[in-house]
Image (spheres, rainbow, N blue to C red):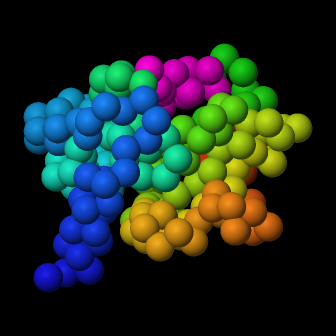
């Protein structure tokens, strides 16, 4: 069994045993056509582990705090779905260039207070970022939560995430790639 298979088995067990507030049951997994529609709307592919979470475990409702967002449709708890939230964030960033939303950074979990855990789908490791919009400016609103989606899931399963009460003194590292990923393209001569 591969490392990802072992991780998916652990996540599936935890998902069955802990639903976030507002979720009466674990949603059914999505099908491959739903993932394809999501990727078409996004304009990029989901990292394989993220796609497997949706395809094999459920359409959101599990994970830290409020759990993973559903992929395309709004859940029973009224949280936004990942794809529409990404598209809305990108649109808002175009309208307000002081608060750009990086291309390929998909919100996957809502923390409350407009904070999101997001996966950088443009990077092979699929790091998880924390978007904390209560900062003074966009450059100080992005932090590296985990170097990969697998590490983020392990932190949840092992109770070692920054959001755990016993870890409330953990400092997250600012996301160094934010300026590179949101810079406007230079005009060509």
In the displayed structure image, the side of residue 149 where residue 44 appears, left or right:
left
- Specify whether residue 130 is painted magenta: no
For image coordinates 59% across by 41% down, the residue present is: 111
For image coordinates 88% across by 38% down, the residue present is: 136
- Main secondary structure along the magenta-highlighted residues: helix
- How far from the left and from the top, in percent, is residue 144? 64, 61
Pick the quarter of the image with the C terminus: top right
Q: Is residue 119 above or below residue 123?
A: above
Q: 117 or 79, which is in the foreground?
A: 79
Counting the numbered discs, the total is: 0
Give the magenta-colored segment's residue range: 78-93
**Residue 90 appears in which quarter of the rendering?**
top right
- How far from the left and from the top, in percent, is residue 34? 17, 33
The residue most toward the top is: 95
For image coordinates 68% across by 61% down, the residue present is: 165
Q: Is residue 152 above or below residue 184?
A: below
- How far from the left and from the top, in percent, is residue 169? 79, 67
Pick the quarter of the image with the N terminus: bottom left
Q: 145 or 64, which is in the foreground?
A: 64
């Amino acid at each position: 069994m591969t490392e990802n298979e072992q991780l998916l088995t652990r996540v599936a067990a935890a998902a069955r045993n802990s639903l976030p507030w507002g979720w009466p049951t674990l949603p059914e997994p999505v099908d491959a056509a739903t993932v394809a529609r999501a990727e078409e709307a996004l304009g990029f592919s989901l990292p394989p582990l993220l796609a497997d979470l949706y395809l094999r475990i459920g359409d959101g409702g599990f994970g830290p705090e409020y759990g993973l967002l559903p992929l395309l449709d709004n859940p029973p708890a009224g949280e936004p779905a990942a794809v529409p939230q990404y598209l809305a964030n990108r649109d808002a960033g175009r309208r307000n260039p002081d608060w750009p939303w990086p291309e390929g950074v998909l919100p996957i979990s809502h923390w409350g207070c407009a904070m999101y855990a997001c996966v950088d789908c443009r990077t092979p490791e699929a790091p998880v970022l924390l978007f904390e919009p209560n900062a003074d400016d966009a450059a100080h609103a992005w932090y590296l939560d985990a170097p990969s989606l697998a590490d983020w899931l392990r932190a949840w399963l092992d109770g070692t995430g920054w959001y755990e009460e016993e870890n409330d003194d953990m400092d997250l590292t600012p996301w160094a790639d934010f300026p590179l990923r949101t810079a406007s393209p230079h005009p060509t001569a």
